[in-house]
Image: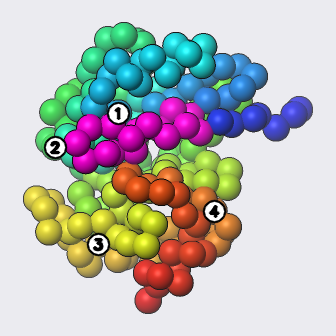
Amino acid sequence: MTEPKITIETIPVGSLETNCYLVYDEGSRQAVIIDPGDEAERILALVNARQVTVKLIIHTHGHYDHTGASEALRRKTKARMLIHQGDLDLAGFTPEAFIHDGEIIFLGPFEFKVLHTPGHTPGGVTLVGKGFAFTGDTLFNSGIGRSDTTGGNETALWKSIREKLFTLPPETVIYPGHGPASTIGQEMKVSGP
């Protein structure tokens, strides 16, 4: 069986330039949207241009700048919406399912492992694929997420980073909620203990 060819496209949306990600398999044309914070029509235009079918809309956490376009995209694509239960109150929508720590989300030929990484929010998660991870607002290029907003917890945030993210292979590419990509190894040098 041949390895799936995964394409990851970044769409910065809204006033905070939140990174929305369109992730799809070149063969099956099945896709996932991660963190559609705003500009639903722009995201949908890219989906249509790539001729992919969105099966899932997954949220790394429930802040509005990561969820604002979710309902509009669910109506247009009929995709299932997923979030961690810890962020249900923040999200303001009802998902089709909750995601849990250690769960494997299968989509066509590829998969994501869910790591519960609270600290920025109680239900924050990181989605780990083969060689890459979507870290939401937990870990950025040269920085970590805020913990001073409602539900934030600095101790939990550092625990998530050190015990979950920094145990990933150092070459793992991270795709954060804002700003450019990086690697786990690079962030261990910058933000490490």
Question: Looking at the image, do the residues carrying marks 2 and 3 touch, with CB atoms under 8 Å apart?
Answer: no
Secondary structure mostly seen in magenta is strand
Q: Is residue 88 above or below residue 27?
A: below
Query: Amino acid type of disc 1?
Result: Pro
What residue is rendered at 60% in x and 75% in y?
Answer: 185
Is residue 80 found left or right of 131 in the rendered image? left
Q: Quadrant of the C terminus?
A: bottom left
According to the picture, the residue beneath numbered tag 1 turns out to be: 36
Determine crowd level at label 3: few under 14, some 14-19, many 20+ residues with C-alpha closer than 10 A: some
Indicate the amino acid at tag 2: Leu
Q: Can residue 73 be spotted in the picture? A: no
User: Which residue lies under the disc numbered 3?
Assistant: 156
Where is 38 relative to 171, above or below? above
Q: Which residues are magenta?
A: 8-23
Q: Earlier in the sequence, mark 3 or mark 1?
A: 1
Which of these two is toward me, 155 or 85? 155
Circle 4 sits on which residue?
Answer: 172
**Residues at marks 2 and 4, CA–CA distance in whole angstroms:** 29 Å
Q: How far apart, in angstroms, are the residues tagged by discs 3 and 1?
A: 25 Å
Q: Amino acid at mark 3?
A: Ala
Local SS, label 1: loop
Is-magenta flag for residue 9? Answer: yes
As drawn, the label of residue 90 is: 2
Sequence order check, earlier mark of 3 and 4: 3
Left or right, 7 with respect to 91, comes to right
- In contact (CB < 8 Å): disc 2 and disc 4: no
